[in-house]
Amino acid sequence: MSDDARAALLDKRSDLLARMAGISAAPADSGGISFGKRVGDGTSIAVERLTQVAAHEQMQAQLDEVERALEKIDEGSYGRCDVCGGEIPTGRLEVHPWAVRCVACAAA
């Protein structure tokens, strides 16, 4: 299981890093952004960047969980909850191999 989990986690890490790099790249054309009385391109660009920042933060949090799950494989504690020490159900790990908390602790 841990070999399959490691492969899935490494794939997820690569995917997240690539997506985050795309978001982090400087905009191709910032143009003459102005924030006046009219809603225009500047406002649209600002809203888009705020959305990208939020998405980047979510991906960073997931990347942190992926990294922690990889550490847990190396430690031999993969499949155990970081909070309560209980077992994380196999079904949860199949869906989210980066899960480091059981369902109850993740919901809290």
Image (cartoon, rainbow, N blue to C red):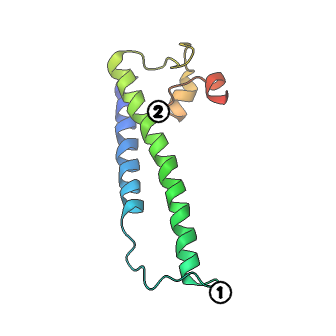
In contact (CB < 8 Å): disc 2 and disc 1: no
| Percent x, y of residue 38 | 65, 86
Q: Residue sitting at 36 percent across and 65 percent down?
A: 25
Q: Nearer the viewer, mark 2 or mark 1?
A: 1
Residue that label 1 marks: 38
Looking at the image, how many numbered discs can be counted on the residues? 2
In this rendering, is residue 45 above or below 86? below
Amino acid tagged 2 = Trp
Residue 18 or residue 50, whichever sits in front: 50
| Percent x, y of residue 28 | 37, 76
Residue 24 or residue 77, whichever sits in front: 24
Q: CA distance from mark 2 to mark 1?
A: 45 Å
SS at badge 1? loop
Label 2: few (<14), some (14–19) or many (≥20) C-alpha neighbours in 10 Å: many
Residue that label 2 marks: 98
SS at badge 2? loop
Label 1: few (<14), some (14–19) or many (≥20) C-alpha neighbours in 10 Å: few
| Percent x, y of residue 64 | 43, 37
Q: Looking at the rendering, in which quadrant would you find the C terminus?
A: top right
Residue 7 or residue 102, whichever sits in front: 102
Q: Residue sitting at 54 percent across and 63 percent down?
A: 50
80 relative position to 47: left or right: left
Amino acid tagged 1 = Arg
Whichever of callouts 2 and 1 sits on the residue coming sooner in the sequence is 1
